[in-house]
């Protein structure tokens, strides 16, 4: 009895292989693991139109036979017949995404160069036509030298024709001699073949192609990305100002109402100096956070964020990382915790470790209130050029400083404790589309709620505890309350350590609760100055920015900003690092190097600013 023929579905990720496999095999499937690996093996029985039963295997998605991940390794070994007890497939069914043909043809050429009997399934042609792209399968078949069958797996279109092509595939072999082509030559050939196969395309499809020529250009693309980021940070200050003024007015009115309604007591001081001054000083930055996330969500929904990741891959490769690290690092701009958890998708363990260790250097949204209050206090609200504000430029510079610092640390780590080279990275570009207002609104509401929930829980709790530590024991006659308090005595001890980098006692005190949540540094300063003001109503009524400006010098303010660019994030982040690295070794290492980096950066900033006469 002759051996049952084996058919393998192979192609790039997201080509629709699984949908095609399900349509062909139905419920006649088996799922197991390949020997020695955790990658799933999906096989099923398919009956050809001739009545011949064959075994069909759905191979993991891959971008090439020179594997860089466990999935790609399994695919390469199955095709080569390198798994013990498992014969190589008799026929390859190469599945291509019709709407992303050029990218998928690169791997298809590598498969055709093997010389195995091959059939091409041009899948998802309906989606390509919906997007304005009509392809000629006959032209593509002539270019490739093998049958090309248009299919729509989810609607079972083209399955009979595909079965017939598989049945007769044993009678032919791949036509073109592609074995001598390198990666660059294959990409050039893929472009030529994809262009030749196009029967017609809509204006929108041509527009999208034109946009990619600019946005993915190695010279123009980074300039566009920098311009987009520039607009974002200008908007964070310019657009948020009216809303912030409204919130500040509301917080001030609530402060005055509570102070007027309650008699002088510890409860009134707790509510006015602790809760309202502390928590209110953080809530006022909600409009800036919403504006920042509005831009981020719009870039994700429009398809531009993936293109930014592609552009960043070149820079990351120069420091030993790949574009796979971009998404976790990008997530860390919102919060380092989901960013660190997202590193689970990085297959190289040293690449993953490096990404985890530099994720806290991405400027999370919790740092924005700290940046905003200092910038507003010391940087004039003036235009450098027409419509270009100095405050927005300084904010952009702080974000860039975090990214540059992260890349420098990554380069050092990849040459020392996490030694290794950059791994390959290929990603598919999503289609351009207009962001849906409903989705944007839901995303912004979720971000706003997370921020307000932190203000109502973590920040509220830390602020109340700090107020208690600032209020007791009570100062004697002629003694400053902050100096007499428990918190003041702790801060005086820490101030000795941070005095060389320009920090005073109040700044030192703000660093301690900031380990619970970065934005607590703002509420800490507000609470400290409210307690220090005592019964001076005029000083109590002054905005936090005015109080900081009256007490700090510009070198001190710049040093404080430099500290928060590099200092470790909240303790929750440290706990996640411990969990993701299975111990305290790397979490402790991260704490030490970030504190050291923050101390050096703040000190250098302070003394350079002093030397410059600022």
Image (cartoon, rainbow, N blue to C red):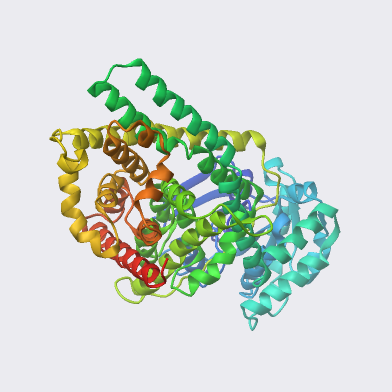
Name the image quarter holding the C terminus: bottom left
**Residue 406 percent location from the top left of the image:** 41, 65
Would residue 215 appear left or right of 607 to someone viewing this image? right
How many discs mark residues in the rendered view?
0
Towards the viewer: 467 or 117: 467
**Residue 117 percent location from the top left of the image:** 65, 68
Above or below, 301 relative to 118: above
In the rendered image, which quarter is residue 84 located in? bottom left
Q: Can residue 172 be seen in this snapshot?
A: yes
Above or below, 605 relative to 561: below
Would residue 85 appear left or right of 506 to someone viewing this image? right
The furthest residue to the bottom: 180
Name the image quarter holding the N terminus: bottom right
In the rendered image, which quarter is residue 12 located in? bottom right
Towards the viewer: 216 or 126: 216
Would residue 56 appear left or right of 408 to someone viewing this image? right
Q: Can residue 86 be seen in this snapshot?
A: no
Towards the viewer: 286 or 13: 286
**Residue 205 percent location from the top left of the image:** 79, 55
**Residue 519 percent location from the top left of the image:** 38, 44
In the rendered image, which quarter is residue 480 located in? top left
């Amino acid at each position: 009895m002759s051996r049952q023929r084996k058919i393998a579905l192979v192609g790039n990720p997201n080509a629709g292989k699984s949908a095609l496999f399900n349509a062909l095999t139905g419920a006649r499937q088996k799922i197991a693991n390949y020997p020695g690996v955790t990658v799933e093996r999906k096989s099923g029985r398919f009956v050809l139109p001739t009545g011949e039963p064959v075994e069909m295997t759905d191979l993991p998605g891959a971008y090439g036979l020179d594997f860089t991940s466990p999935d790609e390794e399994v695919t390469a070994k199955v095709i080569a017949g390198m798994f013990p007890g498992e014969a190589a497939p008799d026929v390859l069914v190469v599945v291509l995404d019709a709407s992303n043909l050029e990218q998928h043809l690169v791997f298809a050429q590598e498969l055709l160069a093997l010389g195995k009997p091959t059939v091409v399934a041009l899948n998802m042609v309906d989606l390509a036509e919906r997007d304005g792209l009509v392809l000629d399968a006959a032209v593509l078949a002539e270019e490739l030298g093998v049958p090309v069958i248009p299919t729509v797996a989810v609607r079972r279109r083209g399955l009979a024709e595909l079965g017939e092509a598989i049945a007769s595939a044993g009678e032919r072999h791949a036509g073109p001699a592609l074995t001598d082509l390198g990666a660059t030559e294959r990409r050039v050939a893929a472009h030529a073949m994809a262009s030749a196969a196009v029967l017609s395309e809509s204006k929108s499809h041509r527009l999208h192609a034109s946009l990619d020529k600019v946005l993915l250009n190695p010279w123009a693309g980074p300039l566009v990305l920098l311009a987009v980021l520039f607009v974002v940070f200008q908007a964070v200050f310019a657009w948020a100002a009216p809303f912030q003024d409204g919130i500040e007015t509301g917080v001030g009115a609530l402060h005055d109402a509570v102070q007027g309604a309650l008699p002088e007591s510890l409860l009134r001081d707790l509510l006015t100096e602790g809760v309202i001054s502390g928590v209110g000083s953080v809530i006022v930055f909600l409009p800036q956070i919403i504006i920042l996330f509005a831009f981020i969500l719009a870039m994700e929904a429009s398809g531009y964020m993936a293109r930014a990741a592609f552009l960043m891959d070149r820079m990351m490769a120069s420091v030993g990382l790949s574009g796979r690290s971009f998404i976790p690092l990008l997530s860390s701009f919102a919060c380092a915790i989901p960013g660190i958890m997202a590193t689970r998708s990085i297959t190289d363990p040293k690449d993953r470790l490096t990404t985890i260790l530099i994720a806290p250097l991405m400027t999370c949204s919790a740092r924005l209130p700290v940046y905003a209050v200092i910038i507003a206090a010391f940087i004039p609200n003036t235009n450098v050029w027409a419509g270009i504000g100095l405050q927005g430029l300084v904010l952009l510079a702080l974000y860039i400083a975090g990214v540059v610092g992260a890349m420098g640390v990554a380069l050092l780590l990849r040459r020392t404790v996490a030694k290794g080279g950059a791994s390959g990275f290929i990603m598919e570009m999503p289609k351009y589309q207009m962001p849906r207002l409903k989705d944007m609104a839901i995303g912004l509401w979720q971000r706003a709620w997370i921020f307000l929930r932190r203000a109502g829980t973590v920040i509220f709790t830390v602020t109340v505890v700090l107020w208690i530590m600032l209020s007791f024991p009570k100062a004697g006659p002629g003694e400053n309350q902050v100096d007499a308090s428990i918190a003041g005595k702790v801060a005086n001890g820490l101030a000795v350590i941070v005095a060389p980098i320009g920090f005073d006692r109040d700044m030192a005190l703000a660093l301690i609760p900031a380990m619970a949540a970065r934005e607590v540094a703002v509420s800490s300063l507000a609470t400290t100055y409210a307690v220090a003001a005592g019964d001076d109503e005029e000083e109590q009524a002054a905005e936090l920015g005015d109080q900081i400006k009256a007490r700090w010098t510009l070198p001190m303010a710049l040093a404080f900003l430099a500290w928060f660019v590099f200092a470790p994030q909240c303790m929750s982040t440290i706990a996640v690092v411990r969990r993701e690295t299975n111990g305290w070794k790397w979490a402790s290492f991260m704490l030490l190097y970030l504190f050291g980096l923050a101390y050096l950066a703040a000190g250098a900033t302070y003394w350079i600013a002093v030397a410059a006469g600022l």
